[in-house]
Structure formats: structure tokens, C-alpha cells
């Protein structure tokens, strides 16, 4: 029996696209995987992969020479909710281990802290997690990560329809006119965000807190809205994302896995918001 064509999937056109397989393995988004394929970093059955190639369970897929274990399509991925401290790194490096220091040593503890919160996730939870609409490093609060690249991409797309809430700390008090301008949601690009609420939320001394709720806003957008009013923003914390709320019982640096119901609720909230935005067809 002749050998299968070199570099081709044994299942021909019956398998799944390579980008989808690697994304589901939690390695990266499909777009990033495409860049890896173009750069020649991925091989299938010992030959350089090409865009559009399909692979099956028996195909040997390697990234930079390392064999990738394929996940079944029905296996799904995990989604974690993290309470990240401002200034703490979220994204983990590809090599998240350090063999240069003894286990339990101060060097290991320092390295783990420097590398970020994702490196404190037990290996049994997954080898790689992909952030979903992450806050800027200087800020913090509620973060989502997924071990499934395809699911992470789906959640990322849904963020534009999700209502998120933020706590913003500024130096000094904003005028009522500044608050009204923030409510208009105008960004430097000319895009307008839907701002549902922006109101004072207390504070001490010269530090004042404001609560803002907006649809599809990122932490960068929120900072820009306040800085356009001349406000000196010192901290932004995301406290809510759709139906998900940052529980006070979840300490900074800690995480928990979303339940099946919570994940479906998040996706349903995005779909409902998008449908409401589009509205019914005109007669």
C-alpha cells in the first residue's frame, strides 16, 4: 500500500482545519496559528504545514518540533474568572517552568510572581490559557481566560455586545459637565460607546472613585474617556462583565472556573444585546 502524500493529512479533506485544531488545543487564536503556519513553525506528518490543510486524530502535528496532543471536538475548553491585581502580569510565557532553582525556594516564588497570575494555575487545569478582552496591565479587576482558543475567540467577539462595569479612581473631583461629556462616550477615533451610567462613588482625600457602566468598552476605552476630561486616572478596576460579577470573596490573585451555566449566560447576554442593538426589521 502506498504511503500517504508527504505533508498531507491521512484523512485528506475529511479532517478538521489545522488552525481550528491548534486553537482548540489552547495554543493561540486561529489568526495567530495562521501566522505560525506561514512562518514554517508547524509540521504535519513531518512536512511543513500549509494553510487550509485538514488533519485527523492519527496525524502527527508538531509546533517548533514539539508534538501537539489533539483535543476531541466535543471536549470543550475551560474558562477561568481571575481577580487580577493592578500591575500584575496576566499572560504567561510559553515556558512557564524554571529548573534553575530548587523547588520551594525564594527564587521560584519570585519568578512565579514576576511571570504573572496564570503561572499559579495548576498544570492540571491546562497548559495554556488565552486572555479574553484583557485589561491593561496598569489596571486590574475581573479577567477571563480560556484554555480553548476557538472559545476564546468567540468570547472576544461577544464582548462588543456585553455591558461591563468599572470602578475608576482619579485625582480630584470631576465637574458635572465632565460627567455629562463622559456619558456621550466619544473616543479619539470618533467611535461612540454606549455609556449607561457614570456617577460618583465616594473616596477619601484627593482620591475620588467613579462607577461607569458601558457596552463593549475596554479598560483602555474607559481610561481615554476620563483623560479626555483632563482627569488624572490612577486606577481602573473591572468589576462586572455581563452577568459575571467580581465576588468580594475571591481575593486578588485568585481564580475560579466558570460553570456551564455561567458560560452559557455570558454568551446568551451577548446575543441578546446584539439582537437588541440591531432591532427588528422594518416593515
Image: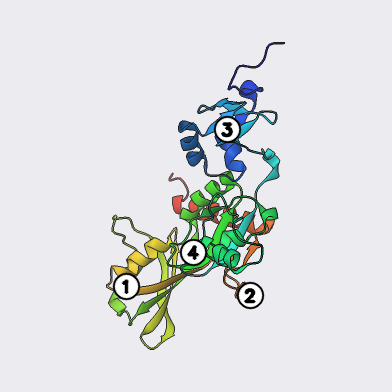
Q: Which residue is mark 2?
A: 249
The span from disc 1 to disc 4 (Cα, nearest Å) is 19 Å
Instruction: In this rendered view, identify the residue nearer to me: 67 or 168.
Output: 67
- Name which residue lies at 54% across and 28% down: 49
- Disc on the earlier residue, 4 or 3: 3
**Which numbered disc, 1 or 3, marks the residue that appears first in the sequence?**
3
| Mark 2 or mark 4, earlier in chain | 4
- Residues under labels 1 and 3: Cα distance? 49 Å
Drawn side of residue 53 relative to residue 14, left or right: left
Give the mark nearest the N terminus, 3 or 2: 3
Q: Position of residue 18 (x, y in %)?
A: 57, 32
- Residue beneath label 1, please? 180
Q: Looking at the rendering, in which quadrant would you find the C terminus?
A: top left
Q: Is residue 19 above or below residue 109?
A: above
> Disc 3, disc 2: CB below 8 Å?
no
- Gap between marks 3 and 2, in whole Å? 41 Å
Amino acid at each position: 500500500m502506498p504511503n500517504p502524500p508527504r505533508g498531507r493529512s491521512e484523512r485528506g479533506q475529511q479532517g478538521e482545519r489545522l488552525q481550528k485544531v491548534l486553537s482548540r488545543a489552547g495554543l493561540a487564536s486561529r489568526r495567530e496559528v495562521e501566522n505560525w503556519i506561514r512562518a514554517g513553525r508547524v509540521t504535519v506528518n513531518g512536512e511543513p504545514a500549509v494553510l487550509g490543510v485538514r488533519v485527523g486524530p492519527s496525524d502527527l502535528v508538531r509546533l517548533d518540533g514539539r508534538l501537539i496532543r489533539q483535543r476531541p471536538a466535543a471536549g470543550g475548553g475551560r474558562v477561568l474568572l481571575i481577580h487580577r491585581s493592578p500591575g500584575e502580569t496576566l499572560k504567561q510565557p510559553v515556558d512557564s517552568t524554571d529548573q534553575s532553582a530548587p523547588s520551594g525556594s525564594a527564587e521560584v516564588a519570585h519568578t512565579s510572581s514576576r511571570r504573572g497570575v496564570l503561572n499559579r494555575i495548576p498544570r492540571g487545569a491546562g497548559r495554556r490559557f488565552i486572555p479574553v478582552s484583557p485589561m491593561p496591565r496598569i489596571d486590574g479587576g475581573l479577567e477571563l481566560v480560556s484554555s480553548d482558543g476557538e472559545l476564546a475567540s468567540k468570547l472576544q467577539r461577544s464582548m462588543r455586545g456585553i455591558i461591563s462595569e468599572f470602578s475608576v479612581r482619579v485625582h480630584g473631583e470631576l465637574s458635572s459637565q465632565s460627567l455629562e461629556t463622559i456619558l456621550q462616550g466619544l473616543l479619539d477615533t470618533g467611535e461612540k460607546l454606549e455609556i449607561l451610567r457614570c456617577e460618583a462613588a465616594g473616596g477619601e482625600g484627593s482620591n475620588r472613585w467613579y462607577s461607569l457602566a458601558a457596552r463593549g468598552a475596554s479598560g483602555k476605552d474607559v481610561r481615554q474617556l476620563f483623560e479626555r476630561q483632563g482627569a488624572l486616572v490612577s486606577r481602573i478596576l473591572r468589576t462586572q462583565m455581563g452577568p459575571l460579577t467580581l465576588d468580594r470573596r475571591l481575593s486578588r490573585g485568585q481564580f475560579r472556573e466558570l460553570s456551564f451555566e455561567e458560560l452559557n449566560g455570558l454568551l446568551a447576554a451577548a446575543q441578546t444585546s446584539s439582537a437588541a442593538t440591531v432591532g427588528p426589521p422594518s416593515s
